[in-house]
Image (tube, grey):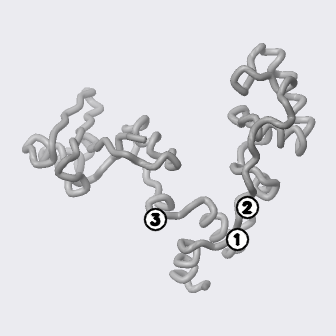
Amino acid sequence: MEKYVQIYELSEATDDETVCAYYPNPSKNVSGKKNKEYIKIAEKEAREGECKLLVWRTVPNNQKCYTLTQNEVEQIVTFPLIEKGYSKQDCHALADRLGLKRPLMYDLGYQNNNCIGCVKGGMGYWNKIRKDFPEVFESRAKLEREIGHSCINGVFLDELDPDRGRIEDEISTDCGIMCYLSLNDIGLS
């Protein structure tokens, strides 16, 4: 997947990449290779907060956070866990080793700690909600009929086949390499 990714210095861009300087007030963009004089000036202006420097890059599909950097260029966002290579499992394992209790939804086998009955859930999620929280399932099914729209593309919850969708495995708290390295760094290994 290709996205705009914010950089903070021209040294972060390769010679082949085009750097885009985004100026919010007034709204304008300036693009060019990092060796161009006007891009070097934009780097100085970025340090002063006048613009943001962006490059168009291929990023892994599982890193949805980069969508945020593309859509919210006015915000400075960082993703330290992803940048250090932590997986979701590593985060759960590290929290477990540190004695932090994870939210109940994870222990019930859900992949995210959304509100119970999240309208963004897919078929597998809703079939699991049907089993674990039948009153929530019924309430959302009734609400769908009242408003005349389904939260799952074209399938009302009260018509959802109980065997549809996929249920992923519970997130393990087995410690991977990043978890072990972190525990070692803080003296808990």
Alpha carbons under labels 2 and 3: distance apart: 21 Å
Say if mark 3 contacts mark 1, CB within 8 Å. Answer: no
Tell me where residue 81 appears, x and y as whole percent.
Answer: 50, 61
- Which numbered dot is residue 59? none
Say if mark 2 contacts mark 1, CB within 8 Å. Answer: yes
Seen from the viewer's position, the closer of residues 65 and 128 is: 128
How many marks do you count on the picture? 3
- Which numbered dot is residue 84? 3
Tell me where residue 118 appears, x and y as whole percent.
Answer: 74, 36
- SS state under label 3: loop
Q: Quadrant of the C terminus?
A: bottom right
- SS state under label 2: loop
- SS state under label 1: helix
Choose the circle earlier in sequence order: 2 or 3: 3
Q: Quadrant of the N terminus?
A: top left
Seen from the viewer's position, the closer of residues 174 and 37 is: 174
Answer with left or right where residue 147 lies relative to residue 75: right
Alpha carbons under labels 3 and 1: distance apart: 19 Å
Q: Which residue is mark 1?
A: 96
- Name the residue located 60 percent from the left edge and 66 percent from the top edge: 90
Q: Tag 2: Cα neighbours inside 10 Å, few (<14), some, or many (≥20)? A: few
- Name the residue located 90 percent from the left edge and 42 percent from the top edge: 131
Q: Amino acid at mark 2?
A: Arg
Q: Amino acid at mark 1?
A: Asp
Q: Residue furthest left?
A: 37
Q: Which residue is mark 2?
A: 102
Alpha carbons under labels 2 and 1: distance apart: 8 Å
Tell me where residue 7 appears, x and y as whole percent.
Answer: 30, 50
Answer with left or right where residue 186 lies relative to residue 36: right
Q: Residue 120 sits in which quadrant? A: top right
Seen from the viewer's position, the closer of residues 151 and 51 is: 151
